[in-house]
Amino acid sequence: MNALIPLLSILTAGPLATSEPVGNSTEATAPAVEAVRFEVDHSALLEEQMAAAAEDSAFFVEQDGAKELTDRHGVDVVEDAAVPAIVVKLAWKDYEHSVYSIEIGVERVGESYQAVETFEATCINNSALTAAVIDKLPAVLSKLTPPEPDAPDSDEQESVEDEGTQDPNETGATDRPQRRPLGIKGKLGIGLVAAGAAGLISGGVVYAQGRRFDKDDPGHADWEGLDFRPSGVALMVTGGALLATGTVLLVLDRVQGRRGARARAWLMPTPQGVAVRGRF
């Protein structure tokens, strides 16, 4: 009697497989993907079963499984390598007692095959076989749902929000020192620098005149005439002192404006001129 069971399965495959497949899942599930490939691998059945009967079993599983995916789960079944695949692998656990070993897995685009459901089922005909496969489709479909990105921690989210609402005018405020506008010392320093530069130039021009003799009596070399050299030296010394003082005042104003510190400086006469000393 046991030996007749596989033969009975072959003889009744056609009529019984056309009936509505029955599964344990009665409610439609939200589609995990919009389209899939649905493939059935029956090569392992050929070790115990005739090719025609094995091909019929694979055909009905593929046909009824595709119909279930489309009608109940809203997933289109297409032949496109650019969509993920659901693969059903059929094998015999016990051919004489019609016990199938079934594995259902998924193959995402660009990834290797991954088994999802592996089970055994006693199926005396193709309708029972397709029903056993259809029962596992919801669990297999759920594996094709793209993983949701991890939600950021509350601290990280607050940090991102703070960065997004930061005042652009405050960006980099701590990266460079603050400068205040030019103060009284700075303005006075600029004036003295300008006056000192003018004094140096004027003194140089006057000094260049040298001693001027009387044009009417050029032969009297002992007559000193007008000597512009002392006046030129005086102008250059005065201009140099003004220039140095203005420079010191301008530097002090900028140092205090940058650091907010109290800088001190003073002028010291030297045999060569004027020296600047102080604490900056």
Image: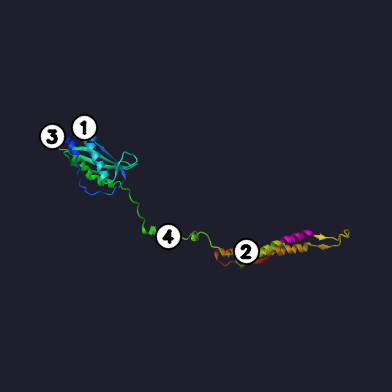
Q: The residue under label 3 is which amino acid type? A: Leu
Disc on res. 4: 3
Could you tell me which secondary element the residue under label 2 belongs to?
helix
Q: Is residue 94 visible?
A: no
Q: Earlier in the sequence, mark 2 or mark 4?
A: 4
**In this figure, which residue is indicated by the disc labeled 2?**
250
Could you tell me which secondary element the residue under label 4 belongs to?
helix
Q: Earlier in the sequence, mark 1 or mark 4?
A: 1
User: Residue 42 at what x, y percent from top left?
Assistant: 24, 36
Q: Which residues are magenta?
A: 200-209
Mark whose residue sits in front, 1 or 3: 1
Q: The residue under label 4 is which amino acid type? A: Asp
Q: CA distance from mark 1 to mark 4?
A: 69 Å
Q: Foreground residue, 89 or 71?
A: 71
**In this figure, which residue is indicated by the disc labeled 1?**
52
Disc 1 crowd rating (10 Å Cα; few below 14, some 14-19, many 20+) is few
Mark whose residue sits in front, 1 or 2: 1
Q: CA distance from mark 1 to mark 2?
A: 103 Å
Mark whose residue sits in front, 2 or 3: 3
Could you tell me which secondary element the residue under label 3 belongs to?
helix
Disc 2 crowd rating (10 Å Cα; few below 14, some 14-19, many 20+) is many
Q: The residue under label 2 is which amino acid type? A: Leu
Q: CA distance from mark 2 to mark 4?
A: 41 Å
Disc 3 crowd rating (10 Å Cα; few below 14, some 14-19, many 20+) is few
Mark whose residue sits in front, 1 or 4: 1
**In this figure, which residue is indicated by the disc labeled 4?**
162
**In percent of the image, x 13 and y 34: which residue is there?**
4
Q: CA distance from mark 2 to mark 3?
A: 112 Å
- Quadrant of the image occupied by residue 13: top left
